Image: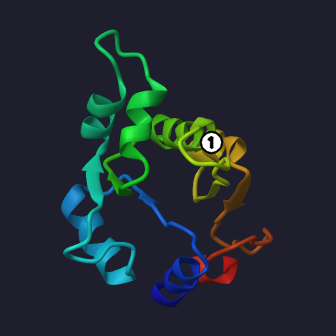
Amino acid sequence: VPDAIQKCQRAGITVRMVTGDNINTARAIAIKCGIIHPGEDFLCIDGKEFNRRIRNEKGEVEQERIDKVWPKLRVLARSSPTDKHTLVKGIIDSTMADQRQVVAVTGDGTNDGPALKKADVGFAMVIKLAWDCCLFQNFSLII
């Protein structure tokens, strides 16, 4: 996986990890994989903090708030499927850059369906069973 992450980064692709793991586990994995590097200016937050930053007093998601988070966000831990979808939608709907961001999402469960569908490119990573055909079992195969 670290080699695949490095290929993405060399191609100008920002890799973000959105996971249900706790923040410490997620950060350790992200460092080991090369998604984040100590000393860089990035965000590594959990779903609760993500929602605190992107929602107004009424609990509504505001694009301006998402636009303050997603450019530096590299790790979103303890996240829900709704958090993942909200992040994907927020990046796609952003007008911060001259060109619209293209978003690719990997997912390994049915809860990832909304984010996979919203993304420009969605990769379903599934476990190969004797009676199934496997799309992708490994992130590096996508790259």
Residue 138 showing in the rendered view: no
In this view, 47 is above or below 28: above
Of the 4 image quadrants, the one containing the C terminus is bottom right
Q: Residue at x 34, y 9 (%)?
A: 58
In this view, 17 is above or below 81: below
Q: Residue at x 44, y 23 (%)?
A: 62
Along the horizontal axis of the image, is 80 left or right of 24?
Answer: right
Place of residue 57 in the rendered image (x, y in percent of width and height, measured from the top left): 28, 12
Q: Foreground residue, 98 or 15? A: 98
Along the horizontal axis of the image, is 1 left or right of 37?
Answer: right
Q: Residue most toward the bottom?
A: 3
Q: Residue most toward the top?
A: 58
Place of residue 64 in the rendered image (x, y in percent of width and height, measured from the top left): 43, 29
Residue 53 showing in the rendered view: yes
Q: Splitting the image into 4 quarters, where does residue 54 fall?
A: top left
Q: Residue at x 36, y 43 (%)?
A: 69
Q: Secondary structure at mark 1?
A: helix
Q: Amino acid at mark 1?
A: Ile
Along the horizontal axis of the image, is 141 left or right of 16?
Answer: right
Place of residue 96 in the rendered image (x, y in percent of width and height, measured from the top left): 53, 42
Q: Splitting the image into 4 quarters, where does residue 36 fall?
A: bottom left
Q: Which residue is mark 1?
A: 92
In this view, 26 is above or below 38: above
Place of residue 4 in the rendered image (x, y in percent of width and height, measured from the top left): 55, 84
Q: Foreground residue, 27 or 69? A: 69
Q: Specify few, some or many for label 1: CA neighbours under 10 Å numbering under 14, 14-19, or 20 or more.
A: some
Q: Residue at x 51, y 90 (%)?
A: 3
Along the horizontal axis of the image, is 45 left or right of 79?
Answer: left
Q: How many marks?
A: 1
The colour scheme applied to this rendered structure is rainbow
Q: Splitting the image into 4 quarters, where does residue 118 fall?
A: top right
Q: Residue most toward the front?
A: 98
